[in-house]
Amino acid sequence: MSANYIYTAILISAAATYLSRFLGVLSSKYVNEEGKLFKFVSCISYGILSALIARIFIHPVGVLEQSSTFIRIFVAGLTIVVLFLSKKNVLLSSFFGIILFGILNFYIH
């Protein structure tokens, strides 16, 4: 494979990405945030995101696959609890989840 193909693929990907963003900026003044279409797209987006997160917990790929499902779900639940107890401090809850996940995988698994 020639280097020209790689550069062409990068340029086409960048053009597609920035064109869609540019069109989004242009059309944003015509979108009603309280409208039914916006709420529908928002619900679909949240649904896709929750499905991806569930897939990561239930059917992980790679190194995460070596940990047990119970540990993954348990750590996620405690991390959410810490998130709300810390008044939505994302940094604190993220570090808590990472450290707890590492400790549980090291000692239990």
Image (spheres, rainbow, N blue to C red):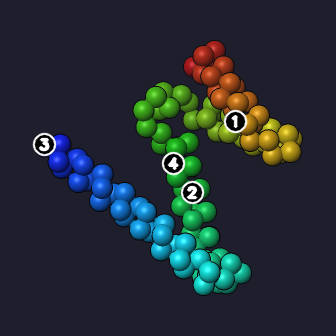
Task: Kindly indicate whether the residue at mark 4 contacts the one at mark 2 (C-beta within 8 angstroms).
Answer: no
Residue 98: give x, y in percent of width and height: 65, 29
User: Callout 3 environment at 10 Å: few (<14), some (14 to 19), or many (20+)?
Assistant: few
- Near-viewer residue (59 or 100): 100
The residue sitting at 13% across, 43% down in the picture is 2
**Helix, strand or loop under label 3:** loop
**Helix, strand or loop under label 2:** helix
Left or right, 66 with respect to 73, comes to: left
Disc sitting over residue 49 in the figure: 2
The residue sitting at 43% across, 37% down in the picture is 61
Say which amino acid is labelled 4. Answer: Arg
- Near-viewer residue (102 or 65): 102
Vertical comparison of 15 with 101: above or below: below
Examine the image and state in which quarter residue 38 appears: bottom right
Separation of disc 2 and disc 1 at Cα? 18 Å
Q: Mark 3 points at which residue?
A: 1
Examine the image and state in which quarter residue 19 appears: bottom left
Disc sitting over residue 94 in the figure: 1
Task: Kindly indicate whether the residue at mark 2 contacts the one at mark 3 (C-beta within 8 angstroms).
Answer: no
Say which amino acid is labelled 2. Answer: Leu
Separation of disc 4 and disc 3 at Cα? 34 Å
Of the residues tagged 2 and 1, which is closer to the observer? 1
Separation of disc 1 and disc 3 at Cα? 41 Å
Q: Earlier in the sequence, mark 4 or mark 3?
A: 3
Residue 24: give x, y in percent of width and height: 52, 72
Image quadrant containing the C terminus: top right
Separation of disc 3 and disc 2 at Cα? 35 Å
Q: Earlier in the sequence, mark 1 or mark 4?
A: 4
Q: Mark 4 points at which residue?
A: 55
Of the residues tagged 4 and 3, which is closer to the observer? 3
